[in-house]
Image (cartoon, rainbow, N blue to C red):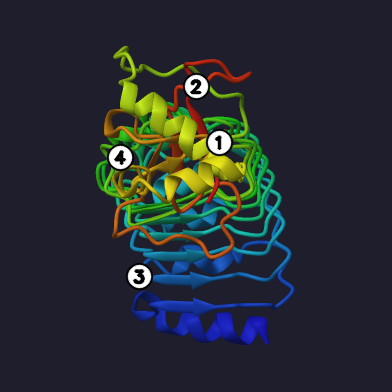
């Protein structure tokens, strides 16, 4: 069957635009490919090909190449000859490295799918993929990503789920066109500032975010007013169901009105009144973000506590907790 399909393709010569040999148990690249210079799409997924041969270097008009689910161990140097290539699928192989010049000629590449491989690093040369808009490297073994990746000015979607990343470079802020960022199930503890990005979708559940000890935050040094001190005392006594205070407060509607404006600290549970000591500030994500339904470690709203209370945490506390 495979030979018959190849013979039919060869009869078409330069007019043959598509060759599909999906799941044919092929163990090597067809040597006749160099006789199909006009080929636009080559689908060789679900085979047993361990290596890309030199015959592919003649396919300078190729636009789509699918070598998914084979036995490749590297992205070969021959890829540099595919100067018209726009979509490259290499998922489900055993790829652990890039050949030194593999990225050199892929100036028109838009999509690169490297899911389910064995990559532990990405070379700086990935920055040569100037047209790349979609990059997916899920289910690999990446411990870091190169800064060069952050200078792919056309990148709009970056998927790095299920790796071993511990941090994201600050230079990610230079990805001005990035709209979708996936970092699910890594070892990331701290995220860089994203305020310069215009993300529409961001997923990072399954990381160690927001689990560190609270850090110091800047606070106002103003002294509490007598009203603030008195109100806090009354509110805390009412919270403890002090019968005397509960009885007396019924005789003073003005005091009841003041303490009705009281709030509680989300972390220590104590009460306060004054606006300048705002205890809990809800910071929602941008309205155009899509939040994963099974988000575990990044809350929809962040509780920020700057409550000046005299407890074991000390007077200068900045805490983050989940809603």
- State the SS at label 3: loop
The residue closer to the viewer here, 219 or 175, is 219
Q: Is residue 265 visible?
A: no
Rendered image: mark on residue 38: 3
Residue at the image point whose x is 40% and y is 48% from the top: 81
Query: Marks 3 and 1, how far apart in space?
Result: 67 Å
Instruction: Work out whether mark 3 precedes mark 2 in sequence or the reverse, and give the earlier one.
Output: 3
- Circles 3 and 1, Cβ within 8 Å, touching? The answer is no
Mark closest to the chain's N terminus, 4 or 3: 3
Residue at label 4? 175
List the residue tagged with mark 1.
267
Residue 169 lies in quadrant? top left
Percent position of residue 316, x then y: 47, 16
What secondary structure is marked by label 1?
loop
Q: CA distance from mark 4 to mark 2?
A: 34 Å
Instruction: Name the residue rendered at 57%, 80% in the picture.
Output: 6
Q: CA distance from mark 1 to mark 2?
A: 10 Å
Going from the N terminus, do you reach mark 3 or mark 1 first? 3
Q: Is residue 231 left or right of residue 173?
A: right
Label 1 close to label 2 by CB (< 8 Å): yes
Q: Earlier in the sequence, mark 4 or mark 2?
A: 4
């Amino acid at each position: 069957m495979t030979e018959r399909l190849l013979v039919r393709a060869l009869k078409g010569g330069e007019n043959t635009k598509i060759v599909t040999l999906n799941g044919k148990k092929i163990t090597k690249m067809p040597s006749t490919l160099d006789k199909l210079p006009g080929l636009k799409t080559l689908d060789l997924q679900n085979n047993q090909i361990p290596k890309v041969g030199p015959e592919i270097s003649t396919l300078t008009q190729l636009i789509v190449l699918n070598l998914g689910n084979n036995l490749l161990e590297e992205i070969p140097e021959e890829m540099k000859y595919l100067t018209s290539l726009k979509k490259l699928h290499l998922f489900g192989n055993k790829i652990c490295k890039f050949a030194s010049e593999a990225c050199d000629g892929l100036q028109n590449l838009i999509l690169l799918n490297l899911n389910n491989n064995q990559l532990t690093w990405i070379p700086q040369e990935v920055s040569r993929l100037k047209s790349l808009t979609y990059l997916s490297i899920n289910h690999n073994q990446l411990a870091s990503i190169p800064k060069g990746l952050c200078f792919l000015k056309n990148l709009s979607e970056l998927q790095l789920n299920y790796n071993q990343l511990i941090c994201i470079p600050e230079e990610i802020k230079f990805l001005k066109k990035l709209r979708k960022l996936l970092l699910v199930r890594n070892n990331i503890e701290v995220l860089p500032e994203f305020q310069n990005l215009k993300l529409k979708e961001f997923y990072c559940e399954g990381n160690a975010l927001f689990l560190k000890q609270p850090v110091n935050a800047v606070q106002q040094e103003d002294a509490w007013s007598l009203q603030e001190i008195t109100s806090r005392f009354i509110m805390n006594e009412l919270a403890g169901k002090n019968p005397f205070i509960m009885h007396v407060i019924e005789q003073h509607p003005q005091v009841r009105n003041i303490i009705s404006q009281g709030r509680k600290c989300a972390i220590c549970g104590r009460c306060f009144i004054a606006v300048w000591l705002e205890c809990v500030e809800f910071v929602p994500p941008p309205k155009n973000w899509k939040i994963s339904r099974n988000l575990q470690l990044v809350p929809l709203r962040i509780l920020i506590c700057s409550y000046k209370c005299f407890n074991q945490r000390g007077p200068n506390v900045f805490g983050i907790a989940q809603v």
